[in-house]
Amino acid sequence: MACGKRVAAGSGAWICSADECGQAFRAHKATTWAPRGMTPVVKVTAKGTVRVSVAGLCCYRPGHRSRLIYRTLLYRGRKGEPKGFREPGLISLLDAAHQQLSGPIVLIWDRLSLHKTPEIRTAFARRRWLRVYELPAYAPELNPVEKVWSTMKRSLANHGLRTATALAAAVKNRLKRMQYRHDLADAYLAGTGLSPPAPARP
């Protein structure tokens, strides 16, 4: 992480922390209100294999507002559908981030085997605007995107979503809200040891 910060400072690059997660129908439990003596019941469906996969980037650069950039992928359990993000999806996300941020990127992510495939390594070698650093093993506290997922999942607690379309819409809705809450991204990034960004600039 420290090496990535030095490289980013020297090149004027964005530091982008990346991670992936998934959300299924099974609702997360959370406290709620109910009349005295009545246990609250939330009807959910845990049937099927529907899943919304999300790949996201928390982007940091001093003097600029923090950014949350993400892509979603809906798996309905149909034959031939990808169950999660593979190399083309991750590469496409990084290309889109590079275009949106208009600058070089220092990518920081975990040691997932998908991040080390020949296709990923070849694609990264062709992108001169990209430098990649791996997090230490078992260090979720150093990745601000982990906190994005935690916030998203807490906001979906006790929601009885019953269709794939509703699940995908709910995930996108929560993430879209967080995109406009730059203070959240700032806090998540500061929690990893980065200094809070200077006053935002468009």
Image: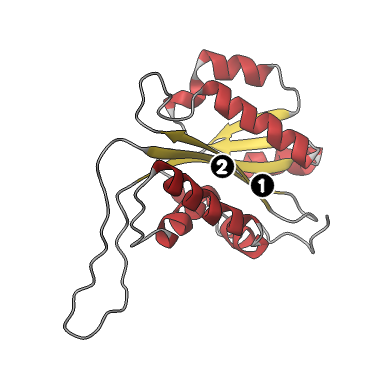
Does the image show residue 76?
yes
Colouring convention used in this rendered image of the protein: secondary structure
Tell me the element at label 1: strand
Above-or-below relation of 45 to 119: below
Q: Name the foreground residue: 37 vs 11.
A: 37
Where does the N terminus fall, quadrant-wise? top right
Residue located 76% across and 41% down the image: 101
Disc 2: which residue: 56
Split into 4 quadrants, where in the image is the C terminus?
A: bottom right
Q: Quadrant of residue 16?
A: top right
Q: Residue at x 56, y 42 (%)?
A: 56
Q: Is residue 68 left or right of residue 103?
A: left
Task: Residue under label 1, please give it.
Answer: 59
Residue 112 horizontal/vertical position (percent): 44, 30
Which residue is depicted at the point 65% across and 65% down? 183
How many neighbours does mark 2 have within 10 angstroms: few (below 14), some (14-19), or many (20 or more)?
A: many
Q: Nearer the viewer, residue 187 or 162?
A: 162
Where is residue 53 shown, x and y percent of the image? 45, 38
Q: Is 190 placed above or below 109 here?
A: below
Q: Residue at x 35, y 37 (%)?
A: 50
